[in-house]
Amino acid sequence: MTDTDAEPNPANRRTLPEPQLLDIARRFLGDSGSGLLIAPLGDGLINETYRVETPARAFVLQRINGSVFPAPERIMHNLAALHAASLAHPQLGVRVPALYHADGLPFVRDADGNLWRLGECIEPSRTLHTLAHAGQAREVGRVLGHFHRLGAALDPSAIAVTLPGFHDTPAYLTALDTVVSGADPDQTERDLLSAIDARRSLVQVLERAWANRRTRTRVIHGDPKLDNLLFDVAGERALCLIDLDTVQPGLLHHDIGDCLRSCCNRAGEAGADSARFDVGLAEALLSGYAETSAGLLDTEELDLIAPAIRLIPLELGIRFLTDHLGGNRYFRVRYPGENLDKARRQLALVADIERQAEAIDAAVRRAFASAR
Ligand code: GN1
Ligand code: MG
């Protein structure tokens, strides 16, 4: 059963009326802020995001969820470092949206202390709900590879940790165990808990590899799901990754696993269809990644890609189920059972990935054939 008495996730509601949102936007835009239009933007589960338009151009206004990000100023520090690196390495072609300042600062605090920022809106562009063909998947991989190359040009210690414990799969499992001990799960929830139980040994795979120095910490995006990739209007060329709040030190495998679990799931993250992992899309995505990341991963790290492809949807399934059992306090939900449905979907994806394990191993090998 879910804990319905819990505090709702503040991201579940729109926090300010329109006139106040417009006031915040005007503090960034000054005189150029007349005739503003504002509308909600995207399907983000954590922050609150709006598109703001002047007659001349568009911007992205965002409230950073302070109950998720303990020190939002660190995000601004990382974005500035990343933006500077993108200018210093133009050959990588990584676009980092510019941030606007208000009174000399790259953010505005509202009366409740919440932090708002205004960024460049990269246009013309669009997002895709699903990938239609391998060419698009290859494009996604290319953009992720370039992003990781840019990250490699930065010293991980110069990039602040914005979200402690993010992608710490063992810690997510411990959080689930804790919430389960105080819950009375029904049959559907118990089935998902059993599916997770059967995979406990997988949960440590990246932490163990890291401890044994088979991989190392680098600067990652943290959340390279399909929603966070901008394409050109034709939907053929991937332009850049957006939603850079989770850029912080991590493992490249977190990003690779997350990108594949999102882009190669034919059914998408929400909705009624059952999950299906498309190995052809995965191979195309990884080929694009191999091309532009050009040797970032050594042989031992390449061997961790297949485990990461299984791990990250398991991790997200654990996170959705934990939030469901804990009263939906973290992820924005549109209806009470949404986190449960999403957990079921991610765990079905893990099972489908396992069914195709051999084909996935072969696809990874082919994609990185020239890198070995
Ligand atoms: C959250 O906020 P959004 O929608 O970009 C989450 C990711 C999940 C994703 C699943 C900070 O991202 O880790 O993979 O939902 N971000 C955070 O859609 O927890
Ligand atoms: Mg995000």
Image (spheres, rainbow, N blue to C red):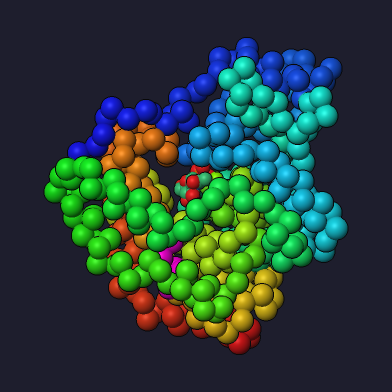
Q: Is residue 196 visible?
A: yes
Image-quarter location of ligand 2: top right
State the residue lying farthest toward the left.
187
For residue 315, which quarter of the picture? Answer: bottom left
**Depicted 128 relative to depicted 71: above or below:** below
**Depicted 346 relative to depicted 111: above or below:** below
Q: Which residue is drawn at the image coordinates 69% and 70% (left, top)?
A: 292
**Depicted 239 relative to depicted 99: above or below:** below
Q: In what quadrant of the picture does the C terminus appear?
A: bottom right
- Foreground residue among 213 and 4: 213
Which region is colored magenta? 307-313
Image location of residue 281, percent across then percent down = 49, 67
Image location of residue 91, percent across then percent down = 82, 64
Q: Which residue is drawn at the image coordinates 31% and 39% (left, top)?
A: 326
**Depicted 123 relative to depicted 194: above or below:** above
Q: In what quadrant of the picture does the N terminus appear?
A: top left
Taking the image as shown, residue 73 lies to the left or right of residue 213, namely right
Q: Which residue is drawn at the image coordinates 31% and 35% (left, top)?
A: 327
Image location of residue 90, percent across then percent down = 83, 59
For residue 38, which quarter of the picture? Answer: top right
Taking the image as shown, residue 142 lies to the left or right of residue 366, namely right
- Foreground residue among 59 and 214: 214
Q: Which residue is drawn at the image coordinates 77% and 46% (left, top)?
A: 80
- Find out whether residue 312 is within the magenta segment: yes
Taking the image as shown, residue 282 lies to the left or right of residue 105, namely left
Q: Is residue 310 visible?
A: no
- Find out whether residue 150 is within the magenta segment: no
The secondary structure that most of the magenta stretch takes on is: helix
State the residue lying farthest toward the top.
19
